[in-house]
Amino acid sequence: MSASLLRRGLELLEAQGRGKAPPGLQPGSGGPRTRRRRKAAPGPGKSKATIKGRVVKSAIEEYHKKKAVSHLRENLQYMTSGRCVADKAVTQQVLTQNRGRKSKDRPPEKKAKKKPEGTVFTEEDFRKFEREYFGTL
């Protein structure tokens, strides 16, 4: 979101009586070409290199804070405790919508198996044909 859109939105909110915009974003408090003040360099009395007042952190405590926690058991309990079961048609629809659109993401389409075509003629018809054309008994 650009700063100008944010400013306009805040102006609208201010016009509706919601309150004044923060002092840095009030209309007319400078445009995009105003220069920002630089922070003053710390004086000789405020050196950041001093250790006074610094708390030493334990490496073990930091490790335990940042260590990944497994929520598997809680998640499984939450998922199995649900009483609502969706219809099979709904679940299939969700699965097809979430599947990719590329051909490699699609499962192969099930082709209908062709049934072997049965003959219209019976064995008796074949024997009769054989007698007529080949003269076999």
Image (cartoon, helix red, strand yellow):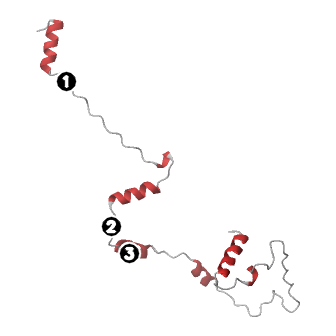
Tell me the residue that label 1 is attached to: 120
- Residue type marked 1: Val
State the separation of the CA atoms marked 2 and 3: 15 Å
> In front: 76, or 132?
132
Marks 1 and 2, how far apart at CA:
51 Å
Picture quarter with the C terminus: top left
Amino acid at the residue labelled 2: Val
User: Which residue is the site of mark 2?
Assistant: 85
Determine whether, in the image, residue 93 is placed left or right of residue 116. right
Left/right placement of residue 46 relative to residue 6 reads right
Where is residue 99? Give x, y as percent. Answer: 46, 54
* Element marked by disc 2: loop
Marks 1 and 3, the one that precedes in the sequence? 3
- Tell which tag, 1 or 3, sits nearer the viewer: 1
Q: What quarter of the picture does the N terminus occupy?
A: bottom right
Q: Tell whether label 3 touches label 2 (CB within 8 Å).
A: no
Q: Residues within 10 Å of mark 3 (few under 14, many from 20)?
A: few
Closer to the camera in the image, 79 or 9: 9
Residue 67 position in % (x across, y down): 56, 77
Name which quarter of the figure residue 58 lies in. bottom right
Q: Quadrant of residue 45?
A: bottom right
Farthest residue in the top direction? 135
